[in-house]
Image: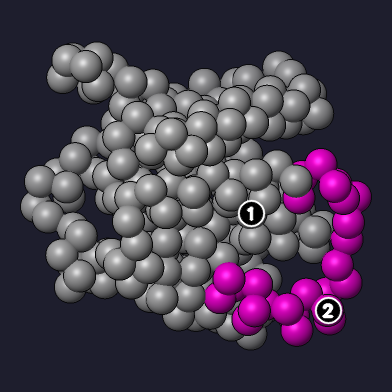
Amino acid sequence: MSLTIELAIAFLCLAAGGVLKGATGAGAPVLAVPALAMMFDVRVAVVTMLVPNLLTNVWQAWQFRGDRLPNSFVVAFSLAGAAGVIGGTVMLAAFSPRVLLLIVALAVLLYIGARLARPDLLLGRELATRLAVPAGAVAGLLQGSGGLSAPVSLTFLNAMGLTRTHFISTVSIFFAVMTATQVPMMGVLGLLTWQGLALSFLAMFPILAFMPVGAALAKRFSKQAFDRAILALLTVLAVKLIYDFAVG
């Protein structure tokens, strides 16, 4: 495959992540990471999303700073995510590319299953507070090892029945804290090079360029129709990832 085609595919993967981010306020890695992992490598996918994850979520956390949940919940959830991402990043360095591919595929399937199984599931605030640490830690583990915490983090926060602004504020802080922890860990473990960091900065442009497209689509189509389209695309990606694992 020529370099031009690879760059075009990478651009489309990141643009798809930007569309989802613009439509929902979260979840750019849900589309970008499995698509990039399918075309290149899980480690490349995780490195590519570092800068976009950090900068977009820091900006959103500041933008929605007036809609934070109680600090006790946000701090516990975010610090647990940071602890989990340390262990996950060690797994990213230690596991073979083939095993990492399976982790991403299973994470995507878990996300699809969670969205389809109990879309109406609601957690009371007291129970959610008790689950904040284990949910944050498992989400961080998935984020570190495969760049995809959404099966746990987004599902958990969605089940709390938060308003859009409270959801974006909380998930943005969570992702920003995890990514800020993940960057130096990847440097220490030799997973992050200056070339990879430069690539990650460049990845910001297609994501930012297509976030307005996602926001416009969210206004034009119903949430149900948008969700179905995303889940259908994720299903195709998951099947392809599992196929690559099986024949690899």
Name the spot of residue 219 as percent of width and height, x first: 69, 23
Q: Nearer the viewer, residue 125 or 28?
A: 28
Q: Amino acid at mark 2?
A: Leu
Name the spot of residue 84 as percent of width and height, x first: 48, 75
Residue under label 2: 127
Which is nearer the N-term, disc 1 or disc 2?
2
Residue under label 1: 151
Q: Nearer the viewer, residue 62 or 88?
A: 88
**Residue at 43% over, 34% down:** 247
Q: Quadrant of the C terminus?
A: top left
Q: Nearer the viewer, residue 2 or 168?
A: 2
- Magenta stretch secondary structure, dominant: helix
**Residue at 60% over, 21% down:** 216
Mark 2 secondary-structure assignment: helix
> In the figure, residue 123 lies in which quadrant?
bottom right
Q: Quadrant of the N terminus?
A: top left
Distance from label 1 to label 2 (Cα)?
19 Å
> In the figure, residue 202 lies in which quadrant?
top left
**Which residue in the rendered view is the most extreme toward the left?**
194
Residue 122 in magenta? Answer: yes
- Residue 225 in view (yes/no): yes
84 versus 216 height, above or below: below
Tell me where the magenta segment starts and ends, as one range: 114-138
Mark 1 secondary-structure assignment: helix
Q: Amino acid at mark 1?
A: Pro
Name the spot of residue 191 as percent of width and height, x first: 20, 60
**Residue at 74% over, 19% down:** 221
Badge 1 crowding class, 10 Å Cα cut-off, few under 14, some 14 to 19, many 20 or more, is many
